[in-house]
Amino acid sequence: MKVAYKYASPSMCLKKNGCTTLGLSPDVSRDEKVSFWGKLKNPLKFRDAMLMLRQIVISDGSRKQKQRPEFFAWLDREIESRIQEHEKYLPGVREEIQNKIDGLQNERSIKDSEIAKLQSIKQDLQKEIDKYDVWRDYYLLERKFWTFIKNRDKDLWFVLDPVITVHPDLVSFEAFSIDESIYGCLSIEMDEFEMLQDPKLGTTNIDFSSKLGKEIERFRTYSNVELSVNPEGFSVDTGVTPEYMEKKIDLPETWIKGFNQVSSAANLNGVTVSLDPTDMYDICSFLRRHKTNQSPKYMKWVMEKNKHVRIIFEPYETVLELKTIYTGNKNREEKIWGRQRWLVAEKLIPLSKSFTVKLLGFGMPQFIIADLGKIKMTIGFSSWTSNDWVKGTAFNIMSGFIGSGYYSDVYNLLKKNRFMSIDAIHGEFNGKPKNEITSGIGSLLKRGEGYYDAVNNVVRFRKLCNEQIPKELYETTETEAAVKKLMDDGMNNFRMKLNENHEYIFTNSYPAPNEKHKNYRFENTDDGSSRMIPSNTVKTELIIDEDGQVSGLKCGCREWRKGPKNISSPCPHILALYMVSAKFTQLTPEPNREYKINDILFF
């Protein structure tokens, strides 16, 4: 998506009469002219939080290819020396071998010419096929895009992030890392400022250069710092009016879609653990001192009721016992990969009162909320470093955000009130279908016109771009359409059971996606034996625990069997069963009794 930003001047730090003004120049091409001016009560907390957000922006955990020119130079010399030895001591043998090789090569050349003709035909066919593959060079171009910006224009690199929004109750900054695996949202309550003028609400991109980041590093506790977002720009007292600065950039599709997926994932149920700052320090200290290329490289959280939380670091098998006591109803274990990314939270440890960790299950993202008092930092990690928020994920479907629903009504309501809880939004549309309201909220998020605030559990109005994003970035996907069709096919085969571990086991049978590829199942015969017979349905099983977290998955479809087989890459059958089953976890059925849909309706 190509966008153009227009700034009255670059952002800058101005010092006058013992006061430092952090002037952020907003994008004046937007409809809402955002402005803000307030004096910070705790400049040190603001400094470290902003520097941490900057650290998220420049973070890149993608694997780098190693270059070994010295080794290849030595290898060339070694090969040359061995060739010389053979020419000196074995000329006859070499000549005989060469004659045999020449004969074989002549035979091979005949075969190669035949193969070349077939390959030429194959390449011509592949070129015809590639003409219709619009995504064939996407990831290569995306990598070149980021490399070019980083190496040629570092200021332009930072223009993408952060995005600043002025709300009635707080100011928020949102950012993504380079590899798009880490999301950060810094929210500062209005009570943290001594307001110098009435703010004007809205969202804007800000000109946030690397030079400005270095100026923020100079803030101290004794500094008088004012935060100013001024559409008219800033200038040093030179008497020269600054010229408008324009920048054009092609935003990556994953950068736009990532904001929606983060909000959808933050809305899901999970296990919440409150950590003391010393616990977070112990975790970061171990990660800082231990790095390895040996697999497995994960940390396993062991949580037992009324006991201290333990973390097992692999492959060291080191156990770290935290001060935090787990108060959940069910014992559980959670594995987390990409653990080195947790070090981005290290800078906030001395200033934080506590850290809240939200775990969504195996293969799902994790969220960390740092509580600095009136300042909160929300960090979201994708399941693996190499897995951004878009690849193989369907968090919007799991949250019920399918289709457009009452998008226009939700948009007007949130634009008026600026932030509301999901329950409050449903309450405003009393009498209308709840699922259509939920779809309207999801459509708002997919269009970049809102985000989910995990700190306050509300949906906030926020326009990500200065113009409407392309329809193909928010329209209903093939997966969403497939899920909706499966949900509409009926629930005649739906079953629910509560096991002895108080886990809900849901099963259903769906029509096979492709009748040409038959599934098979065992059937007992009259003589007591069993046989395999073809089936035109696939059986799907889903296990949800008391916390609403997915703890087990099974599906008989080809897509699921060929994939990673975890919730980070679900098939349409699992998503459809999840959408139907999630509403029944509030029921209290008899343990080990199987319920059909007609039985459930009588609860």
Image: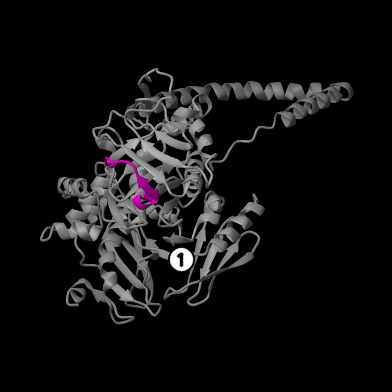
Q: Quadrant of the N terminus?
A: top left
- In front: 72, or 474? 474
Badge 1: few (under 14), some or many (20 or more) residues near its Cα, within 10 Å?
Answer: some
Q: Name the side, left or right, on which 476 lies relative to 132.
A: left
> Does any portion of residue 123 appear in the rendered image?
yes
- Residue 107 image-quadrant placement: top right
Task: Give the secondary structure at mark 1.
Answer: strand
Residue at the limit of the structure toward the right, as seen here: 89
Compared with 514, 306 (above or below) is: below
- In front: 561, or 335? 335
Q: What residue do we see at 33% from left, 80% from top?
A: 592
In the rendered structure, which amino acid carries the disc numbered 1? Val
User: Is residue 526 highlighted in magenta?
Assistant: no
Query: Residue 61's spot in the image, x, y percent?
Result: 54, 43
Q: Which residue is mark 1?
A: 273
Query: Residue 424's spot in the image, x, y percent?
Result: 21, 59
- Residue 283 image-quadrant placement: bottom right
Query: Residue 269's spot in the image, x, y percent?
Result: 35, 62
Query: Residue 465's spot in the image, x, y percent?
Result: 30, 35
Compared with 90, 544 (above or below) is: below
Q: What residue do we see at 45% from left, 74% from top?
A: 327
Q: Name the side, left or right, on which 408 lies relative to 388.
A: left
Q: How is the image coloured?
A: one colour
Compared with 560, 4 (above or below) is: above
Point out the stretch of residues depicted in magenta. Answer: 187-201
User: Is residue 195 highlighted in magenta?
Assistant: yes
Q: Name the side, left or right, on which 111 lies relative to 390.
A: right
> Does any portion of residue 517 appear in the rendered image?
no
- Residue 471 image-quadrant placement: top left
- In front: 520, or 277? 277
Q: How many marks?
A: 1
Compared with 445, 85 (above or below) is: above
